[in-house]
Image (spheres, grey):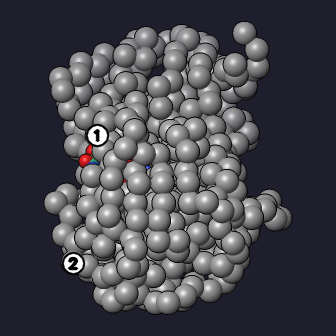
Amino acid sequence: MDRILINGGNPLKGDVRINGAKNSALKLMAASLLCDEPLTLTNMPDLADTRFMAQLLKHLGVEVSRQNGSSMVLHAKALAEPYAPYDLVRKMRATFNVLGPLLARRGRARVSLPGGCAIGARPVDLHLKALEAMGAQIELDEGYALAKAPKGLHGAMINFPFVSVGATEHAMLAAVLARGETVLENAAREPEIADLAACLNAMGARVEGGGSARIIITGVDHLNSATHRVVPDRIEAGTYALAVAATGGDVCIKNCDPAHLGALWDRMRAIGVSVQLVDEQSVRIIQSDRRCQAADVETQAYPGFPTDLQAQFMAVVCRAEGASIIRETIFENRFMHAPELSRLGADITVHGREAVVHGVEVLHGAPVMATDLRASVSLVIAGLAAKGQTEVNRVYHLDRGFEGLERKLGALGADIKRVSGP
Ligand code: EPZ
């Protein structure tokens, strides 16, 4: 199994280019099921998760091909049996979002329930309620959602009791081909939602308000071929920014959208890092070799501080001067990185959804084990800032969401390499 070896202590310097967003790409890929003409996605990241989604879509009858490196063409000309088996769903929750498009296009579908994961139980009740409000009849049987819409899906008023990115996207994907108007209240406002709305509209859908708390979708009969550029990955951009905060250095992060990371910039400035907005696609992060200041963080739905950057922020404040309180409000079990960071010498105490981090002057390299995607990259960040060698195991988590991580960090001056074998 691959491991990553890091000899910490090097400041990061230079430019880094950000890829398209994983969490947008996966839902855009699902959107291809809605249309019998090709959907071309550009700025597509090449990740274990996008390859896994491609595998499921191929199973469902979609022709998927990569072109010119970062483009993908998905053509759902004729769909196969609308059945998504457990083995093609269990590894990644975003696969469940094929249920709505399959129902919209085929009127029936059998899709495995995704199950829990390392960061929490993560139910799909809001997804199912939204589809039922649009006329779907859904039974849960032996771990599968068996859904049918014999009279087709129809528009509905859906008021989400709390914000869910996946449920908002799922409802949008189902509503674009439903009869009549669907109104989503208390919708998630993440940039990935606005991106999905833009792609669906390019395909001929009528979606208004994507990226706001109220989305109005007027159903159409048919979608058409389109080309769409995937929004830049704000979590990848934020991860590199936090890596510079941890190691010191001067890095220009390019091909990103700094406007999507306002809450992060606020917290980075609070810990003493210089964040300079260069233009609409680049941001420059400068940090001297002195220690950061402590600062508190609470994760929130967008535009709040992203839960997907919580672990990376924690890695940075492990070496800050003073104590930081980190509150996780989105997922109930997202501090699995804390005991691993403690193996490097961090002083972290977790009480339920709150972690108190007392900054220490020095972290020391050690073997650590990743439990999920963002946790594993937080261990890489801590390793870059630690004295001596850190070995990050279970690297397959990183491959789910960070394309070319060692290559990009190496080009910025980090001493990092991947090794295979026992
Ligand atoms: C998306 O997950 C992202 N994944 C997550 O990124 C991200 O952390 C999360 O949004 C929040 O920003 C993808 O886009 C593929 P939610 P999602 O529905 O859609 C609860 C990463 O590392 N809930 O907004 O699953 C849920 O358990 C991943 O890239 C229900 O109770 O998140 C959670 O506590 C991790 N019932 C909260 O809502 C439901 O039906 C928010 O989840 C749906 C969600």
Measured as percent of width and height from the top left, residue 387 is found at 55, 15
Q: Callout 1 environment at 10 Å: few (<14), some (14 to 19), or many (20+)? A: some
Q: Which mark is drawn over residue 331?
A: 1
Measured as percent of width and height from the top left, residue 194 is found at 43, 73
Residue 37 in sight from this viewpoint: yes
Residue labelled 2 has its Cβ within 8 Å of some atom of ligand 1: no
SS state under label 2: strand
Residue 16 in sight from this viewpoint: no
Measured as percent of width and height from the top left, residue 37 is found at 68, 80
Q: Is residue 37 above or below residue 89?
A: below
Q: For the C terminus, give its image quadrant.
A: top right
Nearest the eye: 272 or 231: 231
Q: Earlier in the sequence, mark 1 or mark 2?
A: 2
Q: Quadrant of residue 38?
A: bottom right
Point 31% across, 16% down: residue: 347
- The residue at which mark 2 appears reads as 157
**In this picture, residue 218 sits left or right of residue 417:** left
Between marks 1 and 2 in the image, the one whose residue lies nearer the viewer:
2
Point 47% across, 71% down: residue: 107
Amino acid residing under circle 2: Met
